[in-house]
Amino acid sequence: MSFRFYSVPPWNPKETELVPDSSGDLKAALARVEYRGFKAFDRALELVSAKSPAVFASSPNDLPALLRTADQLLTAAKMDAGERAQVWRCSCGTPYAVPVALVRPVSLRCDRCGNTVEMDPSRAGAVESTIDAKTAAVNATRNSLSVFFREAMARGWPVLIAKV
């Protein structure tokens, strides 16, 4: 079953606002996240199965719980993002990657050709992420949901869930 989160101002229920990207990555984004003692995805499915649209959270009673969920989404995204690395290449093409946090000037011998590779941060190649495209898409969904939940609660608007 597919569903989406949305929020509306209580004084104008016809106007939909703050709709995040709720693509197929929604299940993966909510996988390790809890809301009020339930797995967030399971709770959303339960609500939307009973009634569509259904209220997922409303301010002020659900504010702390939804903010914890938003924090969990950001934490999961950071954990899955991996470390960013700077990459240097030897003249023979062999890549050498060093996590950005550990970058400092150093020289080493290439394993393949024996040439010296100067790992000078000012002459480094691009900073690359160590995650794949699917994980990046899931993390983008997590980030957009986190921002969406925070914005809805800040405005005092209920977060609704509906079948797609």
Image (tube, grey):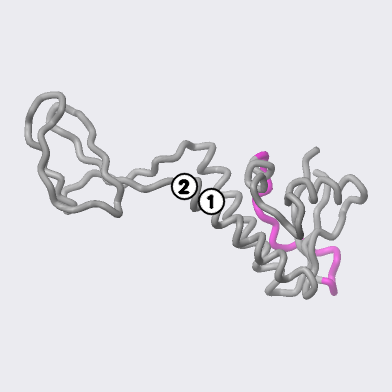
Q: Position of residue 145 (x, y in %)?
A: 64, 56
- Examine the image and state in which quarter residue 160 appears: bottom right
Query: The disc labelled 1 sits on which kind of residue?
Result: Ala
- Residue type at mark 2: give it: Ala
x, y (%) of residue 162?
A: 83, 50
User: As drawn, is 42 to the left or to the right of 144?
Assistant: right
Q: Residue at x 50, y 46 (%)?
A: 80
In the rendered image, which quarter contains the N terminus? Answer: top right
Query: Residue 98 vs residue 26: left or right?
Result: left
Query: Residue 109: image x %, image y %?
Result: 10, 34
Counting every numbered tag in the picture gives 2
Q: Which mark is residue 81?
A: 2
Taking 28 as reference, is 16 left or right?
right
- Confirm or deny contact between disc 2 and disc 1 (CB under 8 A): yes
Find residue 10 and report its image quarter: bottom right
- The majority secondary structure of the magenta stretch comes to loop
Residue placed furthest toward the right:
50
Bounds of the magenta segment: 10-24
